[in-house]
Image: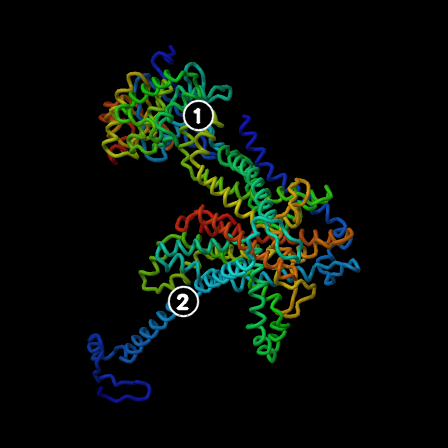
């Protein structure tokens, strides 16, 4: 029985990915459960970010990168040539990057920018959506009086939460987080991790991290990747307490 | 020092002399040892070699400082000449009257100033959007294949082609076919110089933006042109404008392209299809003439041009801020 | 998508213009191209009256003045670039670097005018009157340094060109030196080398491709320079008769004879000179770009 849509948010089947001639992902098969936090860990270059970036087709910006296989979301293969509504896809599958990238605008406009682009909202409705997004990313209280301030004037942790608010404002289903705390200080990191735990009730979260402790703290399911292959995938406690594959054991011992 | 010394500084082995390290004393006592003379000469040679190297280093340093000083001196001479002769040619009517005929006294350079401002200004206004859009194509829409490399390569060539060739080209293409020197031809020639400059500087600025910025906007499902205008251009704004202003300063001083396309006009004609007065060609014609009146006028124009261009450069880049990439 | 198409069109405009340039040049020079063919390049005679056009004097003049400019400018540029990156403290270095860049911003016609009104008389009054008699007894040199103390001439033009290309070559070299890894120098200094030795024996060999590229870039610029040269070269189509004799370059010829070019053959000849110059600069600049890029990577 196909659990896609009811229990699964996304299913990846036989995914192969290429940087030009070089293959980076080999026959990847993975299922992402809804309202779960799935963490992907592994060495640098293991393909974690590459996999993540297939899920919202952001790799398309670079002509030499290509993906073959199936990524099934809401009944369709989003990486097939026939799938054309990529912009809509990206509104539903949002992404937050490692380095916070506030737009060169006010805090308010950072969030309103994409909203304006995609929906026709009255001034009042817009304000409400912005407020809701900022509240969801736990930033509202800190900036509610300074919404006109430039986005880049915020601290690193605040900027990252702004980027999350931006993405949340689109009311997506899935959140892709690409090492969201590696550029942040420990306090901000903790704030983001708490946020992730809160958000998982409403959203499906797929998190790439090189921080094993972080995966242990926030994830429900953990995936270990090496050299473009998925080596092991398991529920968190099983994953860390009873690693089965040799490479995972080596990785856990190594760190 | 005891012991015999012949002309070759050959001190007998068993004699002791004062050396800096006493190792030597120990060695001398051994039968099979390095003769002491070798130790002395090595040290002395090392000392003289060291002195020579230090001397070379000092001379080199002096040479470098001298080079800079000479270059600065030359610059000062040039600026000094411009100021001195320019002031001599200054008059109350300089900015308010049109060009006198060559050889005549009086008059001013009003029409030449207006002409230069017009032709450079229009050229930049047209060149900037074209250049920025072309750079946008190269940075925002990378493509497989050779098209983009070819564009970049040809752009670099146009950037470095001597401006006289550009003047000749527009002459052959436009002036010969239309039968007249014209402002249009002049603008076209200046465009060919300005557009590659703007493409280059804009591309550099846009390339230096963090790729995540673009990706973050794309991930939100925003349309590409909106992203480019609202985010990319806004972030790159400063660099693009700087590039455009510097291109303006460059084309305002170019003589050769205008010499073959727009020539100049003694009168205040601003018709698009006729020659129009402009400062560089005026400077050329009047400075080369045998009349002192006209030469003075040329120098006054030179002073105006120099002050304007250097002023723009200083303001745009500041004295201590360095732009990372040089244009030509 | 529409937007991408518009940007692509703007970019392709550059290709179109370049193509048009080449086509136009060839088209408009057909009379002399077909008429005299390659003889044009070797011809020594430049006589508009008899419709004989030989480009050799102009070509040689271009090369000689550019060579003089390089010989003078490169040592200066090297020393200044080294001074700016290796010897001066940060703030002073940035300041003087800006000053040198300002030199590049001065329009070339100003250099030309300065040359004609200040430098050429200077040469005529102070340098040539003693240099020519001094060289007279020395064989070969008396020919090279021969001529009349009139100020304008090949050497003067070469010197002005040197002043013009100095900022450009200095800037490129400075960037090259500044971007080479400091570890290289540290290795040298820790072995007890003097600063000069580190520069000459470590830095220079490491950046030699780029440095060569900078020199050739300066050469390319010197070949095409028009206004500065036209004022001081004396505009005479005679084969080299001494550094202090007037001569001509391709661009000076075109600039000064353009207005009076009559008939069909004369303008076509001038345009063909332009074509030759274009080809020369193209080749030189391609070589320099290649060298500088490999120098930056190395």
User: Residue B255 appears at what percent x and percent y?
Assistant: 60, 51
Q: Is residue B179 above or below residue C160?
A: above
Q: Which residue is mark 1?
A: A57
Residue at point 42%, 59% (across, down) = C82
Q: Which residue is mark 2?
A: B60
Residue B302: quadrant of the picture? bottom right
> C195 or B314: which is nearer to us?
B314
Residue furthest to the right in view is C50
Residue at point 67%, 62% (across, down) = C235
As helix, strand or loop, the secondary structure at mark 1 comes to loop
Q: Chain of mark 2?
A: B
Residue A14: quadrant of the picture? top left
Front of the two marks 2 and 1? 2
Q: Is residue A110 above or below residue C83?
A: above
| Circle 1 crowding by C-alpha within 10 Å: few under 14, some 14–19, many from 20 | many
Total marks placed = 2
As helix, strand or loop, the secondary structure at mark 2 comes to helix
């Amino acid at each position: 029985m196909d659990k896609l849509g009811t229990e699964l948010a996304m299913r990846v089947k036989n995914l192969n990915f290429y940087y030009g001639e070089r293959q980076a992902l080999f026959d990847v098969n993975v299922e992402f459960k809804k309202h779960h936090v799935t963490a992907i860990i592994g060495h640098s270059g293991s393909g974690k970010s590459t996999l993540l970036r297939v899920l919202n087709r952001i790799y398309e910006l670079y002509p030499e990168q290509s993906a073959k296989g199936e990524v099934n979301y809401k009944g369709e293969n989003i990486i097939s040539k026939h799938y054309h509504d990529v912009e809509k896809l990206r509104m539903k599958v949002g992404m937050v990057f490692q380095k916070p990238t506030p737009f060169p605008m006010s805090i308010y406009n950072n969030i309103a920018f994409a909203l304006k682009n995609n929906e026709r909202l009255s001034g009042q409705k817009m304000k409400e959506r912005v407020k809701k997004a900022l509240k969801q990313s736990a930033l509202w209280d800190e900036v509610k009086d300074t919404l006109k301030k430039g986005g880049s004037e915020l601290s690193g942790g605040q900027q990252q939460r702004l980027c999350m608010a931006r993405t949340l404002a689109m009311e997506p289903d899935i959140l892709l987080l690409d090492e969201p705390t590696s550029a942040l200080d420990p306090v901000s990191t903790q704030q983001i991790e708490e946020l992730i735990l809160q958000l998982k009730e409403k959203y499906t979260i797929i998190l790439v991290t090189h921080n094993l402790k972080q995966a242990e703290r926030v994830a429900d399911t953990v995936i270990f990747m090496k050299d473009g292959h998925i080596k092991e995938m398991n529920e968190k406690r099983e994953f860390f307490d009873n690693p089965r594959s040799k490479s995972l054991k080596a990785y856990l011992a190594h760190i | 020092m005891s012991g015999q010394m012949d002309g070759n500084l050959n001190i007998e082995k068993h004699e002791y002399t004062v050396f800096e390290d006493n190792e030597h004393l120990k060695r001398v006592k051994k039968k099979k040892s390095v003769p002491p003379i070798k130790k002395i000469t090595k040290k002395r040679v090392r000392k003289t070699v060291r002195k020579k190297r230090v001397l070379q280093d000092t001379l080199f340093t002096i040479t470098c400082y001298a080079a800079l000083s000479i270059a600065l001196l030359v610059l000062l001479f040039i600026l000094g000449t411009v100021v001195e002769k320019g002031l001599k040619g200054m008059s109350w009517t300089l900015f308010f009257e049109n060009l006198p005929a060559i050889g005549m006294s009086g008059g001013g350079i009003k029409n030449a100033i207006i002409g230069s401002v017009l032709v450079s200004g229009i050229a930049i206004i047209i060149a900037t959007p074209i250049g920025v859009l072309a750079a946008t194509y190269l940075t925002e829409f990378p493509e497989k294949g050779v098209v983009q490399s070819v564009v970049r390569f040809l752009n670099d060539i146009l950037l470095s082609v001597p401006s006289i060739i550009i003047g000749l080209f527009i002459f052959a293409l436009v002036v010969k076919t239309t039968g007249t020197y014209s402002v249009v031809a002049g603008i076209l020639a200046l465009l060919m110089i300005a557009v590659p400059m703007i493409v280059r500087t804009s591309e550099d600025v846009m390339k230096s933006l963090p790729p995540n910025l673009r990706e973050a906007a794309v991930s939100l499902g925003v349309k590409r042109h909106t992203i480019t205008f609202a985010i990319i251009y806004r972030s790159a704004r400063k660099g693009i404008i700087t590039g455009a202003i510097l291109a303006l300063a460059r084309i305002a001083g170019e003589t050769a392209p205008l010499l073959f396309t727009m020539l100049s006009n003694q009168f205040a004609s601003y018709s698009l299809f006729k020659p129009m007065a402009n400062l560089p060609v005026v400077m050329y014609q009047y400075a080369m003439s045998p009349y002192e009146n006209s030469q003075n006028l040329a120098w006054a124009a030179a002073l105006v041009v120099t002050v304007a261009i250097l002023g723009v450069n200083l303001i745009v880049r500041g004295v201590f801020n360095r732009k990372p990439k040089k244009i030509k | 998508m529409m937007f991408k198409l518009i940007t692509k069109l703007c970019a392709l405009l550059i290709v179109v213009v370049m193509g048009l340039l080449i086509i136009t040049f060839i088209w408009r020079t057909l009379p002399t191209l077909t008429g005299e063919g390659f003889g044009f390049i070797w011809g020594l005679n430049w006589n508009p009256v008899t419709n004989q056009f030989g480009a050799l004097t102009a070509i040689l003049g271009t090369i000689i003045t550019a060579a003089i400019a390089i010989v003078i400018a490169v040592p200066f540029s090297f020393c200044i670039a080294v001074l700016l990156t290796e010897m001066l403290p940060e703030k002073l270095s940035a300041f003087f670097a800006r000053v040198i860049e300002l030199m590049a911003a001065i329009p070339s016609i100003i250099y030309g005018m300065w040359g004609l009104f200040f430098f050429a008389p200077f040469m005529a009054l102070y340098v040539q009157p003693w240099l020519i008699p001094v060289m007279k007894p020395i064989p070969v040199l008396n020919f090279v340094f021969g001529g009349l103390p009139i100020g304008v001439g090949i050497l003067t033009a070469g010197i002005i060109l040197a002043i013009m290309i100095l900022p450009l070559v200095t800037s490129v070299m400075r960037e090259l030196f500044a971007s080479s890894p400091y570890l290289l120098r540290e290795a040298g200094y820790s072995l007890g080398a003097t600063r000069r030795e580190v520069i000459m024996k470590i830095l220079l060999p490491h950046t030699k491709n780029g440095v060569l590229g900078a020199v050739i870039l300066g050469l390319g610029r010197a070949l095409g320079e028009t206004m500065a040269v036209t004022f001081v070269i004396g505009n005479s189509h005679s084969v080299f008769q001494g550094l202090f004799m007037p001569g001509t370059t391709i661009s000076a010829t075109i600039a000064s004879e353009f207005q009076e070019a009559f008939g069909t053959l004369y303008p076509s000849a001038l345009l063909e000179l332009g074509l030759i110059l274009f080809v020369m600069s193209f080749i030189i600049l391609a070589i320099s770009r290649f060298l500088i890029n490999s120098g930056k990577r190395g």
